[in-house]
Amino acid sequence: MREKKYFETMDRNGFKTPCYLFDETECISRVQEIRQQLSAWGGKVCYAIKANPFLIPSLLHVVDKFEVCSPGELEICRRYGVPGSKILFSGVVKTRENIEKALAYPVEVITLESLTHWRLLKECLGEHVEGMDVSRTIKVMPRLSSGAQFGMEERELLQVIEEQQSMENICVEGIHYFTGTQKKGNKYEKEIETAAELIRKLKEEYGLESLILEYGPGFAVPYFQGDDFSAPFGLVQQMKEYIVERKFPFRIDIELGRYIAASCGKYFTSIVDIKSAGERNYCLVDGGIHHVNYYGSNMAMRTPSIVHEKRNEDSGQTPGDVHQKEYMICGALCTFADILVRGLALTEPAIGDVLIFENIGAYSVTEGNYLFLSRDLPEIYLKKQDGSIEKLRAGSPSYPINSCD
């Protein structure tokens, strides 16, 4: 029987399932490798904190900057002591109040998703926001649209540039460009060329020098059985070769979330019931789809990498006695939709065993439908570089949010 390393960790640290465990060493090592690749052209790494805000303290001195997309995320950065010099304040919907708080923080760069953002920023600067250093030049990055609801069309972006030319307290730091996630192959080439053409125009027609391309390549990460796990940095290495060969006359910074965070996380959920109905076998667990979210997993039709950790040794069995069956893994929610895996081969599962879902460090911890059925929020742990385990969040009830005060 395989060594019960996870149970040892769980028992020693008082884990209560369902819970997440993030590995600080894995996360930091991954960023360091990415930075090594980007050093070939002088690019910087930006971590999109929406992928997993609990990793901010671990990455504070490892990444160059953080993309922050909401007022709540900005407050998380304040709580963790992230300096404003490392914050790119982004987000598709910004109110005047949001912009005022970002200016007072003060964040390093503010992205502009629309002409409305541009108007609100000018209003704030014209009235000198309380707490803002009025002598400071505000850096902005207009976002170029890829045809979706994000960013501006080129004509609108050029309008911002034209108006900015006469303003002394605002400077254009660069262009923000992101078109989607879980992209494979060399799609980044066409996207970078599109942005490069715009940057060339801004230099020739408006005299803007030393602009930065803040680019989100949306690199795919492997999640499911059948995916290729053999080249964990293949896409960034491939992009490095392209950028170095092209010798672009501007800096390209890479914005990543999933590609940094996914591999450092595991989700633990205990088997609490086992039964059969007709010809199908079921394992019911104390977690569910409100905690597990793999991008591209349509109605649990694809199976992620899962470790079955048995709680007790099987006594009196010989290898010939052991056999596998296929089980549907269902969660604790009272809905037919709560299916984590439609078919998982397990050997003699028992109540009390734990299923560990791997590569879940990105998004699941924040994207889950946590309020449905008022189940408790799962605990969150961090395995630090020295091997110690730190509890980042205790399991807390969600029912107060779903009921009157």
Image (cartoon, rainbow, N blue to C red):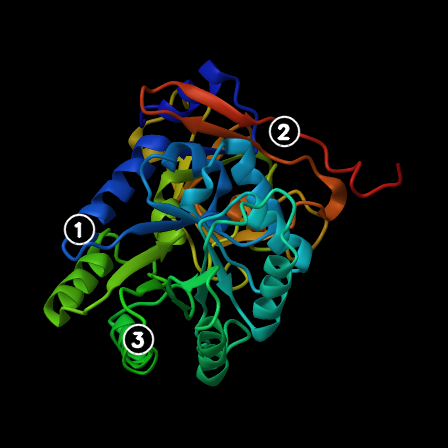
Q: Which residue is mark 2?
A: 395
What element does badge 2 sit on?
A: loop
Q: Who's the residue at 44% across and 49% down the image?
A: 108
Question: Does 115 sit left or right of 245 as displayed?
Answer: right
Q: Nearer the viewer, mark 3 or mark 1?
A: 3
Q: Check if mark 3's residue and mark 1's residue have beta carbons within 8 Å.
A: no
The reply, left or right, for residue 147 in relation to residue 307 is right
Q: CA distance from mark 1 to mark 2?
A: 40 Å
In what element is the residue under mark 1? loop
Q: CA distance from mark 3 to mark 1?
A: 27 Å
Determine crowd level at label 1: few under 14, some 14-19, many 20+ residues with C-alpha closer than 10 A: few
Q: Is residue 375 above or below residue 328?
A: above
**Label annotation for residue 154:** none
Is residue 261 depicted above or below 204 in this figure?
above
User: Which circle's residue, 3 or 1, is located before the other in the chain?
Assistant: 1
The residue at the far bottom in this view is: 155
Which residue corresponds to mark 1? Answer: 39
- Residue extending furthest toward the left: 245
Residue at 24% over, 55% down: 43
Nearer-N-terminus badge (1/2):
1
- Measure the alpha-carbon separation of dots 2 and 3: 55 Å
Instruction: Name the secondary structure under disc 3.
Output: loop
The answer to whether residue 216 is visible is no
Relative depth, front residue between 345 and 126: 126
Tell me the mark number nearer the camera, choosing from 2 and 3: 3
Looking at this view, is 351 or 227 the one in front? 227
- Disc marking residue 207: 3
Where's residue 309, x and y in %? 42, 31
Q: Amino acid at mark 1?
A: Ser
Q: Residue 273, percent across and down?
A: 61, 36
Residue drawn at the location 50% of the way across and 41% of the way down: 53
